[in-house]
Image (cartoon, rainbow, N blue to C red):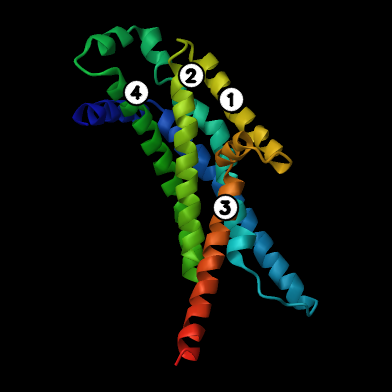
Amino acid sequence: MRNVWIICRKELRSYFVSPIAYLLLAMFAIVFGFFFWNGVNAFVFVGMESQMRGEAFPMNINEFLIRPLVSNVSVIGLFLIPMMTMRLFAEEKRSGTIELLATSPIRDSEIILGKWLAAVILYAGMLLVTAINFLWLFKYGNPDWKPLAIGYLGLLLQAGALLAIGTFISTLTRNQIIAGAATFGVCLLLWVLVWVSEYEFSTWARVLCTFRYSHISRRSAKVCSIQKTSSSISPRFSWDSF
């Protein structure tokens, strides 16, 4: 595990020595900031419009705002994940340092795991930047934190799977552009293949569903609704039992 952490720190250092990490963080923050600003304005507009019409109804901020926002993060990841993985091994091959890694007293699995872990940590940092926007919702509103936490966990797991695919593709070529384009193509293909699950119910179709965030968010919403229902039923049950 020590060797894995050494490779991980080396890769993280290479991310932040070059403009790659700063560019990814800036792009991620700006795009998500626009989505957040647009979503909040839409939420306020719909609420004010319904009040002016005299048709005010309770609006669920988790369903109306948080769920679409977190779903948009997974779409942004489709474009940024290839940029994170395309250089992991392709750059080592191009510069000739792959021989140094291959002959070092470190196992191949530790090298691969260390580089993949560095990409996951960078993506987690990008998610942490977007989480700052949600602090304003908790300051001025009262959203439920459980769906948000489950959603971010789902995003991290989804990114881990796609980053593993990108890491594998990066080992197949020494050209970063080819590695990035191939990774984007595979990620996009996995994304659109989920459409098959709308009418196909076999095992392979259900496996494909795990690569799309919308299915994760639906399941998390169901879990949280079950928790709320059980919490509201249990006091009645205990009261009636006496």
Disc sitting over residue 112 in the figure: 4
**How far from the left and from the top, in percent, is residue 196?**
70, 36
Contact check, label 3 and label 4, Cβ < 8 Å: no
**Which residue type does callout 2 highlight?**
Ile
**How far from the left and from the top, in percent, is residue 5?**
24, 31
Distance of label 3 from label 4 (alpha carbons): 30 Å
Distance of label 2 from label 1 (alpha carbons): 10 Å
Disc sitting over residue 186 in the figure: 1
**Which residue type does callout 3 highlight?**
Ser
43 to the left or right of 132: right
- The quarter of the displayed image where residue 198 is located: top right
Mark 4 is surrounded, within 10 Å at the Cα level, by few (under 14), some (14 to 19) or many (20 or more) other residues, namely some
Q: Residue placed farthest to the front in the image?
A: 241
Q: Which residue is mark 2?
A: 169
Contact check, label 2 and label 3, Cβ < 8 Å: no
**Which residue type does callout 4 highlight?**
Ile
Tell me the SS state at disc 2: helix
Question: In the depicted view, which residue is nearer to us: 149 or 41?
Answer: 149
Tell me the SS state at disc 3: helix
Contact check, label 2 and label 1, Cβ < 8 Å: yes
Q: Which quarter of the rendering shows the N terminus? A: top left
- State which tag comes first along the sequence, 2 or 3: 2
Distance of label 1 from label 3 (alpha carbons): 22 Å
